[in-house]
Image (tube, grey):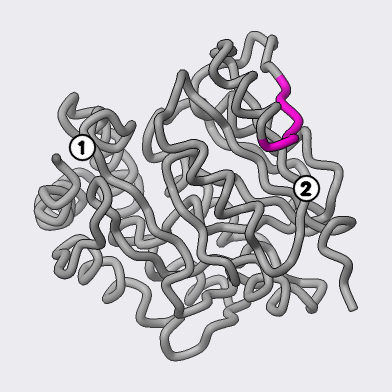
Amino acid sequence: MMRSMENHTFIIPAYKDSPYIEECLISLKNQTKKSNIIIVTSTPSPYLKQVAEKYAVKIITNNTANKGIAGDWNFGLAQAETKFVTLAHQDDIYEYNYLESVLQKTDQKNTQIVFTDYAELVDDKIRARSRNLKVKKFLLFPFIIKSRIRCVFFKRLPFLFGNPLCCPSVTYNKEALPVFSFSPEYSYSLDWYAWLELSKREGAFVFINKKLIKHRIHHNSETSAQLTSDVRKNEELKILQLLWGKRIGGFISRIYLRGHKDNII
């Protein structure tokens, strides 16, 4: 049986002083399978130090020149000494059986990533209806039919029309992802671009069709900030036009953007 402490690490890339990071840490501490937990940050503060000490979690400061979201995520991945690693979002809550469910799907050597379904937590309440989630679930239809996909075409298919994958739900198999890093060209759509690049490589994407994360949306979240600043819109348009050309990519972008209205709080 896999010993999770030897095989998995939760990395929390912390930015400034999130009022929700304690809830995130508690949810990681309460997993049925125990794991290593590390906070990484390029914005150290007395608050983060206090939280790390309170929950006996190691905190590492990113003092490299590679800052920004891509730099922080790449730095975080590099700190994990285990085979499997999850980049946990500081504002999100992980269900108690998240890690156990994920590790049950990592038994095959060709697994690149495992990701799960999720619920949207608007401040402190689960959102009952979401156009955004409906669109994303529709895009994931190949994984609804078959949860483990190795074929490049079907791995890539859902990501040709948008990004239906919840990034904080993803667990990475570092051994199956040599020379992998997030592109600094993107500050929001870096995860979508990464899935497209990984889909070209040999190996499997695995989907767990269970809501094992509560993904928080709030006024001060990076999601809300990027949406209101048009960063997300411009980056997604860029990717869609790379995939489909200027005219068709622009048309798909206009349709896909309608779902983002749910994420503006």
User: Would you name the residue on which mark 1 appears?
Assistant: 233
In the rendered picture of this protein, how many numbered marks are placed on residues? 2
Q: CA distance from mark 1 to mark 2?
A: 36 Å
Residue range corresponding to the magenta coloring: 55-60
Q: Earlier in the sequence, mark 1 or mark 2?
A: 2
**In front of the other: 36 or 135:** 36
The residue under label 1 is which amino acid type?
Lys
Check residue 36 in the rendering and tell me which mark sits there, or answer none: 2
Task: Using the image, tell me which numbered label, if any, was put on residue 78.
Answer: none
- The kind of residue tagged 2 is Asn
Residue 29 point in image, percent of width and height: 66, 52
Q: Is residue 112 magenta?
A: no
Left or right: 132 with respect to 46?
left
Which residue occupies 51% across, 71% down? 155
x, y percentage for residue 3? 88, 67
Residue sitting nearer the eye, 6 or 132: 6
Residue 134, given in percent of the width and then of the height, sits at: 21, 71
